[in-house]
């Protein structure tokens, strides 16, 4: 057992470091490790009865973390996507994929159960790629996030139902299913009472002791205790972990708990994915390469087409539809867990299970490449059909504005600038690409619009050619540069004020046409330094002169940094 863990951890260390350099999700790295050290490749891992138990702990911690991050407020904000689009996607994909599995000779119940598993997508891969591409708040990003939220709930239900349909109990499934649901409700309310009365007192006492060790131990005990209690009730341990995480996610200690268990979760989850990778027969890629390729493309085509058609049916444009389908076309990590559980319960033939595992793995491997290539493909597409109407509407609403301020990015900084403008009775118009933020801001402000500030036609629609000032308050340096270049290309006279996090791109932004660049970190350092000098007794006028001198020298006095271990490279 110890030799197996040593081989797994050492191989994972090398592979994950390589995948980090390639900016690929660690999930794929762990699967590749399992593929390579498994019995069909180098065969470095010996048979061990303890390895599946360690891998199951990874699923328990994954579900607990998922419960912590499970946000009811987010589900309510995206309820149309979560419950309508999500349920439609899962039901249609389950029906179609289940029918195909029935035609391949599987019994009806396992086929539908596996079809439901194949309908799930990879939360880990999709959310990571959308975040790195800055597309979480785009139309297709919101569709993907909403559907993934619904799929996460379905995944927990499926993992609970496998033992029921496997016939592991003496009762028939139509009696065992209602009994399972009753047990789940009882468990939920039991944990709800504990989270309301018992756990807050425990966490308060542990937090008062200021012992990090006790806090970690309490978090681990809660995870393992809920999983054990759920197992005693004849349910999936992952279900108890999910419910416990969901209830603790509403507490004040949520972020600390999440930070404490993250190392255990990541390592145990890595072991789980390695164990899944070991189930994939490498010889199948040689002997059945065309079949695996066909299954991979078929799975992605079916799921992607269903999502795209549903999104299009909801009234979205072609680009949003196909990019939503592309984001959700792959298989997911919960499908691996489901297939492993079905194989243990003899519900899935080994040969078919191996082919589907390989196809799911390939679909996950292709997803980061497809999502990263999608923006370049989108740039070559024609303008979305509904963009013309959006541009005309924004242009008509702001036709009377003249000598106003255009604010690109309406986050924390952009909203502060807007308040200054209102207090000075200076007209302004703001753009932001976060639909939730725009929906909230539009309730009290009529001059805030949804849109990508780097689009030239949208900048012109908000009156760039008539503007007195442009303020770029976006927190992403590459996006800031694109907005600056577009604004300067169409108006070479308007002053442009740019907010940046630091001074790493100061020269580049000035060369691109920025009138003034305000590095946020340097300005806060400058203000703190000036207040410190005043509190030490220096005359305010003398301090102001020094501050003005630092600004006129482009913050040269503040340049240079002795980096620490926690400082990000810029």
Image (cartoon, rainbow, N blue to C red):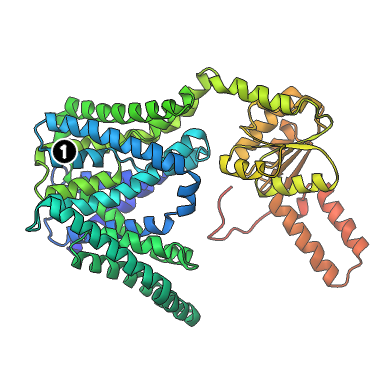
Residue 447, given in percent of the width and then of the height, sits at: 72, 37
Give residue 179's quadrant in the image: bottom left
Residue at the left extreme of this rendering: 170
The residue singled out by tag 1 in the image is 111
Residue 330 lies, with reference to residue 212, above or below; the image says above
Residue 484, given in percent of the width and then of the height, sits at: 69, 32
Question: The N terminus is located in which quarter?
Answer: bottom left
> Residue placed at 51% from the left, 37% from the top?
135
Residue 111 lies, with reference to residue 251, above or below; the image says above
Residue 428 lies, with reference to residue 271, above or below; the image says above
> Residue placed at 27% from the left, 58% from the top?
238
Give residue 2's quadrant in the image: bottom left
Residue 458, given in percent of the width and then of the height, sits at: 66, 26
- As rendered, which of 142 and 551 lies closer to the eye? 142
Give residue 546's quadrant in the image: bottom right
- As rendered, which of 96 and 330 lies closer to the eye? 96
Residue 284, given in percent of the width and then of the height, sits at: 14, 34
- Residue 264 visible? The answer is no
Q: Is residue 124 left or right of residue 499?
A: left
Q: Is residue 108 left or right of residue 438?
A: left
Q: Is residue 451 left or right of residue 327?
A: right
Q: Is residue 92 left or right of residue 78?
A: left
Badge 1: residue crowd in 10 Å (few <14, some 14–19, many ≥20): many
- As rendered, which of 65 and 175 lies closer to the eye? 175
Q: Secondary structure at mark 1?
A: helix
- Residue 554 visible? The answer is yes
């Amino acid at each position: 057992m110890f030799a197996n863990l040593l081989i797994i951890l050492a191989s994972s260390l090398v592979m994950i470091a390589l995948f980090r350099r390639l900016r690929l999700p660690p999930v794929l790295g762990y699967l590749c490790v399992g593929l390579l050290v498994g019995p069909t490749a180098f065969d470095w891992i010996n048979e061990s009865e303890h390895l599946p138990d360690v891998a199951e702990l990874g699923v328990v911690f994954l579900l607990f973390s998922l419960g912590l991050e499970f946000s009811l407020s987010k589900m309510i904000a995206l309820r149309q996507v979560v419950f309508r689009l999500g349920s439609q996607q899962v039901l249609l994909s389950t029906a179609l994929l289940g029918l195909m599995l029935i035609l391949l000779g599987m019994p009806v119940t396992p086929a539908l159960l596996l079809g439901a598993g194949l309908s799930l997508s990879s939360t880990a891969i999709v959310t990571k790629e959308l975040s790195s591409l800055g597309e979480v708040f785009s139309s297709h990003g919101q569709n993907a996030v909403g559907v993934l939220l619904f799929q996460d709930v379905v995944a927990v239900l499926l993992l609970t139902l496998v033992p029921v349909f496997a016939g592991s109990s003496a009762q028939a499934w139509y009696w065992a299913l209602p009994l399972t649901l009753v047990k789940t409700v009882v468990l939920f309310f039991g944990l709800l009472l504990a989270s309301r009365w018992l756990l807050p007192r425990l966490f308060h006492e542990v937090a008062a002791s200021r012992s990090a060790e006790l806090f970690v131990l309490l978090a681990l005990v809660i995870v393992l205790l809920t999983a054990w209690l759920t197992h005693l009730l004849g349910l999936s341990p992952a279900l108890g972990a999910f419910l416990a995480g969901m209830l603790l996610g509403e507490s004040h200690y949520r972020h600390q708990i999440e930070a404490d268990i993250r190392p255990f979760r990541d390592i145990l989850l890595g072991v789980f994915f390695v164990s899944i990778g070991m189930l994939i027969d490498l010889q199948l890629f040689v002997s059945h390469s065309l079949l695996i390729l066909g299954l991979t493309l078929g799975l992605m085509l079916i799921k992607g087409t269903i999502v795209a058609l549903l999104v299009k049916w909801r009234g979205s444009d072609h680009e949003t539809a196909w990019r939503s389908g592309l984001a959700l076309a792959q298989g997911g990590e919960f499908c691996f867990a489901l297939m492993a559980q079905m194989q243990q319960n003899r519900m899935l033939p080994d040969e078919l299970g191996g082919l589907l595992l390989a196809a799911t793995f390939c679909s996950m491997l292709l997803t980061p490449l497809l999502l990263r290539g999608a923006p370049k493909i989108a740039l070559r597409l024609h303008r979305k059909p509904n963009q013309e109407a959006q541009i005309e509407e924004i242009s008509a609403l702001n036709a009377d504005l003249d000598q106003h301020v255009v604010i690109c990015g309406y986050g924390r900084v952009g909203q502060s600038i807007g308040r200054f403008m209102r207090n000075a009775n200076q007209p302004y118009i703001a753009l932001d690409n976060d639909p939730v933020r725009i929906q909230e801001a539009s309730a009290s402000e009529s001059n805030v619009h949804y849109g990508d500030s780097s689009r030239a036609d949208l900048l012109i629609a908000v009156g760039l050619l008539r503007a007195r000032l442009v303020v770029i308050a976006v927190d992403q340096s590459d996006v800031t540069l694109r907005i600056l270049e577009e604004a300067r290309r169409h108006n070479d006279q308007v002053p442009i004020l740019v907010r940046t996090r630091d001074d790493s791109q100061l020269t580049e932004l000035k060369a691109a046409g920025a009138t003034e660049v305000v590095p946020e970190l340097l300005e806060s350092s400058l203000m703190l330094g000036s207040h410190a000098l005043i509190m030490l007794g220096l005359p305010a006028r003398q301090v102001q002169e020094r501050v003005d001198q630092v600004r006129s020298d482009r913050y040269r006095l503040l340049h240079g940094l002795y980096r620490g271990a926690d400082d990000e490279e810029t």
